[in-house]
Amino acid sequence: MRIGELAEAAGTTTKTLRFYEDQGLLPTAERTPAGYRDYTPDAVSRIDFVHRGQAAGLTLAQIKQILDIRDHGQAPCGHVRGLLAARLADIDRQIADLGALRDNVASLRDAASDPEPDTCGADEVCRYL
């Protein structure tokens, strides 16, 4: 299939497909005699895998590692599990950081619940921050 057909089938753009090919996420397509890219039908499932990896928060470099393992005839399941465990730990840290930030902002908001602008010094923009 040509690049436009693949883009439509995979729900992406031709520019993205060219980028994926340049990054090694998508194998280099064969060319027609006229020079058009000619992709095999399995390219759709490969792009779908890339999109699922991105939805899980993996980087394109990590997704490429997984594809490289598979392309060398090995099952990448152990590697994927490790990447997902690391991603989950990152998310847990982000949630904890956001919780601390939320508590701080709530405290600042509570302190400013009855604003008294006249109590700010000349050297202060706002005493609540």
Image (tube, grey):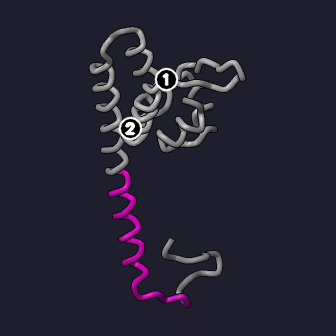
Residue found at the very far right of the displayed protein:
34
Q: What is the chief secondary structure element of the magenta stretch?
A: helix
Residue at 28% in and 21% down: 77
- Element at badge 1? loop
Is the residue 117 above or below the residue 18 in the image?
Answer: below
Instruction: Name the mark on residue 9.
Output: none
Residue at 29% in and 31% down: 85
Q: Quadrant of residue 52?
A: top left
Region rendered in magenta: 97-118
Q: Quadrant of residue 84?
A: top left
Q: Nearer the viewer, mark 2 or mark 1?
A: 1
Q: Tell me the amino acid under the disc marked 2.
A: Arg
Q: Position of residue 113 (x, y in %)?
A: 40, 84
- Element at badge 2? helix
Residue 42 shows up from this direction: yes
Q: Which residue is mark 1?
A: 40
Q: Earlier in the sequence, mark 2 or mark 1?
A: 1
* Magenta-colored stretch includes residue 107: yes
Residue found at the very far front of the displayed protein:
33
Where is the N terminus found, in terms of image quarters? top right
Relative horizontal placement of residue 64, taking residue 28 as reference (left or right): left
Q: Which residue is mark 2?
A: 52
Q: Position of residue 16 (x, y in %)?
A: 59, 37
